[in-house]
Each structure stands twice: as C-alpha cells, then as structure tokens.
Amino acid sequence: MNFDIHRVNRETQKDIQNIINNKTKPPGALGQLEQLALQVALIQSSIHIEVTKPTALVFASDHGIAERGVSIASSDVTTQMVSNFLAGGAAINCFCESVDMELKVIDAGMKKKLVNEPNLINQSLGQGTSDFSLTQAMSVATAEKGIGLGASQVQALINQGCNTVALGEMGIGNTSAAAAMMCALLKLPVEQCVGRGTGIDDQQLQTKRQLIANSLELHKGSIETPLGILAAVGGFEIAQMTGGILQGAQEKIIVLIDGFIASIAALLAVRMYPEARDYLVFCHQSDELGHESVLAELDATPLLNLGMRLGEGTGAALALPLVRASCKFFNDMASFAEAGVTV
Ligand SMILES: Cc1cc2ncn([C@H]3O[C@H](COP(=O)(O)O)[C@@H](O)[C@H]3O)c2cc1C
Ligand SMILES: O=C(O)c1cccnc1
C-alpha cells in the first residue's frame, strides 16, 4: 500500500499568521487555538476554513495477548462494547452526540462476531490477533491489508464530503500491543511505555511488562521497520487506524488523534510517512503511562488534558468544538481595521 503524502504548503503561512495577528485581541491571546487555526488554514489551503461532516471511526478488534491477564476485562468485552456502541450507550456515543459528530463502528477483527447488525461495518482481518508473546500478532501481508482497509474507510467518508475524521478504537488488550509498539519504535524500556490500561493492579502490571519485554526479545529480528513492528506486536485496529490516518493525510483533511492507542497508530504513520504529521491534531493527553512521551516524540501539544484514559475516540470527539471555534474566530472575528480598534 503506497500513499502519496505531501507536507502542507507553507508559502502562505506568513499571510495566515498576519490574519490571526490582526484579529481584535492581544497577539497570541487565543493561545493554542491560534496554532490550530493556522494548522487548519494550511491543511485546507484557504482563508475560509471549516469543518464538514466530521466523523468518528471506531475500529474494534481483539488481541491474543489478552489471554495472558494483561487487562481487567476479557476479550468478550470488546464485542459487548461494540453492541453498546451500536445501541448508542457508550461514552463515545454520548460525546459524538453532544458535539454533533457522526459515528461509525468497524469490526476490524473481533474474536466474537456480531450478526444481524446492519450498522456494523465488516472489515474483519480475523478473530483477533495471535498471542504476540508466542508468535507474530499477524503476518506482514495482513498488516498491509489492514492499512488498506482503514484507508478505504476514510476515503469513503471523504467521498461523502467529510473533511474531519477522528480515529478511535475498542480492543481489550490493546494497550499491551500499543505499548509494545512504543518500546520498539522509540527503543525505550518497558517501564517507560507499559502502563495500567483499563486499571490493572501492581501484580498484573509486572506480568504485563515482563511479557512485553520477553516478546520484544522474541521478535527482535523482525521489529526493525514500522511495518515489521505492526505485524509482530500490533493489532488489527491499530493497522486500520494507521491506514485511516495516512489516507486522511494524503487527501489533506483534518485527522483528529485520540489517546494512547490512536497516538501509537499516528507515530507509526509518521514513521512511515513523516509528511503525514502536518495533518494530525492531537486532541488530548491520556493518563495512560507513555502517552506523554509519545506526544513529545511527535512534537505535539494536546488540546485537552482531562485526566481521561478511555480510548474509543472520546478525547478526539471532545476536541471537535475547539476545532470549530478556531475556524469561527479565523473566519469571522473582526480585524483591528474592521472594528476600528487601535492598539
Ligand atoms: C468496559 C470497557 C470499555 C472500554 N472502552 C474503551 N476501553 C479501552 O480499554 C481497552 C484497553 O485497555 P487494556 O489494554 O487494559 O484492555 C481498549 O478496549 C480501550 O478502547 C474500554 C475498556 C473496558 C473494560
Ligand atoms: O489513552 C487511551 O487511548 C487508552 C488508555 C487506557 C485504556 N484504553 C485507552
């Protein structure tokens, strides 16, 4: 799967910055919203910026490593939560509704299938990954297929007029996969990457760290490339989120990145195509250990820090009003000249 991703054109950056500086406020007084407006204006290459048909894609899949007691929940909960999403009862449903964002749920490879659910998009890569403490989570071919499937899902949204996509996930055990990927991508020890996920106790955390350290040793021959890392210790939902991010960047839309797991997909995408970074908006800082370092690596200052650690795309949905507010002030706030304000 090849992407044709270009950085934003920065020739107009000075003009855009001038527009922002001439708004009726002290220079820089809108803080991060000013950088956000600049980023969106560069992405859209326009001085009228907007959010159209914003959509959250939640990719759900299971993880063989979940059999090892690395989560407070069993893999069954992945499918149960997907039923909850489809019934409108989860946090992501509430937040999408409250910010007027469309929500789509994708089976990226759940262990337990759901039948007769017309609103569940089937892009299953299998019934969960293999246990990466024993073998590769998936083949390289499957990892590539996942990237392609995620990309096609985002392209379908773009075709319908969406210019802002949020990537979310549901997958019991996926903080183990994401943390293992983080160790491999950043060459950091487990103590700095592996956290408590859903809230495991000290004993489980020790088990999780040991398992991941041993797994990285097992896979050391195949974790030299981003794709190799995804195949060895990643997840089906992480593969599809990565593809979605890359397609969004290729098509120059706003890509909203949620918490720890989505940020690992973003890190992987940026390692594959550094140009993709320009299109990513980092929405919140999760309380999951490791997220802060991943954000620092990506030179990202998240918009929100609410002490959340949920995933599902919840942090991304909550940041959408800030993106809209940035567009609004950029388009409609009076300049000093227009308002006759002299400073
Ligand atoms: C009821 C419930 C709802 C969730 N919604 C998101 N997650 C989050 O927790 C999981 C990752 O944590 P770990 O690696 O510890 O399993 C993912 O499914 C993630 O989306 C949930 C987890 C649970 C239990
Ligand atoms: O930040 C996240 O994405 C996260 C953290 C803990 C559990 N699930 C998701």
Image (tube, rainbow, N blue to C red):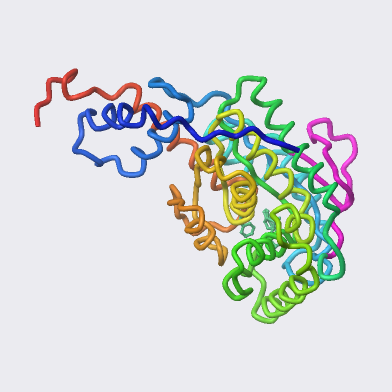
Q: Residue at x 76, y 45 (%)?
A: 82
Residue 318 falls within the magenta-colored stretch: no
Residue nearest the observer in this picture, 321 or 207: 207
Q: Residue at x 49, y 51 (%)?
A: 284
Q: Quadrant of the C terminus?
A: top left
Q: Which residues are magenta?
A: 105-131
Query: Quadrant location of residue 116?
Result: top right
Residue 121 falls within the magenta-colored stretch: yes
Above or below residue 126? Residue 63 is below
* Horizontal side of residue 303 vs 202, given as left or right: left
Above or below residue 265? Residue 162 is above
Q: Quadrant of ligand 2?
A: bottom right
Query: Quadrant location of residue 187?
Result: bottom right
* Horizontal side of residue 6 vs 11, given as left or right: right
Image location of residue 172, percent across then percent down: 75, 58
Image location of residue 40, percent across then percent down: 44, 32
- In the current view of this chain or complex, which residue is farthest to the top? 338
* Horizontal side of residue 130 vs 314, given as left or right: right
Q: Residue at x 66, y 76 (%)?
A: 201
Image location of residue 215, percent across then percent down: 77, 71
Above or below residue 162? Residue 196 is below
Q: Residue at x 90, y 39 (%)?
A: 115
* Horizontal side of residue 194 vs 124, given as left or right: left
